[in-house]
Structures are given as C-alpha cells and as structure tokens.
Image: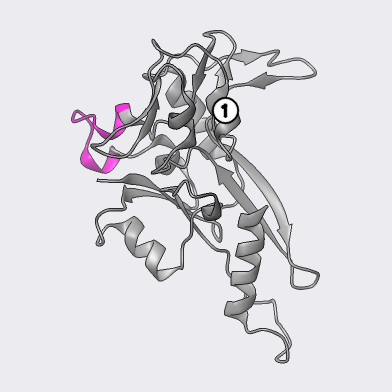
Amino acid sequence: MRLGLVIDLDTCVGCHACAISCKEWNTSGTTGSLSDQNPYEKDPTGVFFNRVRSYEIGDYPHNKTVNFPMSCMQCEDAACVTVCPTGASYKRKSDGIVLIDQDKCMGCNLCAWACPYGSRELDRESGTMKKCTLCVDRIYDESLPEIDRQPSCVMTCPSSARHFGDFDDPNSNVSKLTRERNGDGLMNELGYNPTNQYLPPRLANNITIEKKKKNIVGQVKDWANELISR
C-alpha cells in the first residue's frame, strides 16, 4: 500500500480551505496543538502543514493563474528520514506515510533543510518538527463511516481538487486520475520519488492559440513543466 494525494491544478481555486481545515484538525489530533505567534499583530506566524502558492504561467493573452497547494509529498526515498540523527523521522512500510516520533525529535532542523518542498515546520512551543500525516488518525478511524476516512483537506476542498487513495492499486481513483491526466510528481529529477501527484492545468475554452504555434496539449505540458520546475 502506498497512500498519497492527487491534486488537480486545473480545479484548485486557491481558497486555502485545505490549509485551514488541516490546521484545525491537526491542532486537536495526534500531532498536538499547532502553535501560533502574534496571531493578531503585525507579523503573525504559525505552524501550517498545507500552504497554497499562486503563479501566473504563460504570456498574455495565453496566461493562466495556477494555485499550487503544497504539503509533505510522502516521498518513497525521503531525504528527511535519511538525515534524521535520532530516528524520529520514519516511513511506515505498511502504507508509505512519513511520520515524526515526537518523543524522539530534538528539533535540530536537519529534516527541514533536507526537504526540497519546505513541508516541515518547527513548532516553537513544543520544540519539535511537525508535518502532514495524511490525517493518519482519521483515515484509520473505524468509528467513522468509510466515506469519511479521508484526510481533512480532501474532505474540505470545495472544488474537489484533492483526491486520496492507494497508488499501489492500479484501479484506485488516484491511480486512474494520474494515468488519464498525465499526473506528475514535483521535482522528480531530485530522485526522492514523491508519492503525491499533480494534475496539470488545462486551457480555458476562451483561450486560443495560433495554429502555427504548438498545439494545445503541448502548450499545457510546457506550462506544467515550467510550474513544477520552479
């Protein structure tokens, strides 16, 4: 089993509902409270497992705003696990989820420096590193209806841009979406083999491209590659 997320960059509207839902769930979940500093002052900061970045790709009039949610990619060969000096960071063999043992973590920041996706956060109050757990306490909760055993961010997304499933199952929803929409991992060239996949944005119906230029499919792939490489 290899659990992870598929994120559709074509339908994500950048509303940040995933980030807020994730913050709320994990503040009361197994990771403990996620701290905030100066929440009502000039420079508020805090611990978030999901962050949404927005980019403008292409040139006018063939441009498009793409909202790019980022969290832990649950890499198969996770650099954060490799560099951890205490063994606090580990990858579960049963489902591929990368987790942090809070009792072993000493907050040295090595995993945060090693992660190319910026998905690790140092909680100043606990002095330990924290990250997305794929809501491991929720997805295995048998007291919940099976349809609700999904990460909080997936349940909350109003545009259904986020999908959760088993990538080792070729018939799962995430495997099918990845095949049908040419999904790809972020920065595959680094060799960490991220589990999470992104579906590239498609052109809107009102955007046209001159025939002498690349066809629509080729243009979208170019834009997606440009976005992933940033």
Judged left or right of residue 159, residue 45 is: right
Tell me residue 138's x, y (percent): 31, 30
Mark 1 residue element: helix
Left or right of 6 in this view: 144: left
Q: Residue at x 46, y 62 (%)?
A: 183
Give the quarter of the image for residue 74: top left
Residue located at (22% from left, 37% from top): 145
**x and y percentages locating residue 158 in the rendered image:** 49, 47
Q: Is residue 59 above or below residue 27?
A: below
Q: Which residues are magenta?
A: 137-148
Regarding residue 102, the answer to whether it shows in the image is: yes
The relative height of residue 52 versus residue 10 in the rendered view (above or below) is above
Percent x, y of residue 53: 66, 44
Q: Residue at x 33, y 64 (%)?
A: 176
Q: Does the magenta portion include 141?
A: yes
Q: Nearer the viewer, residue 157 or 75?
A: 75
Looking at the image, residue 182 lies above or below residue 30: below
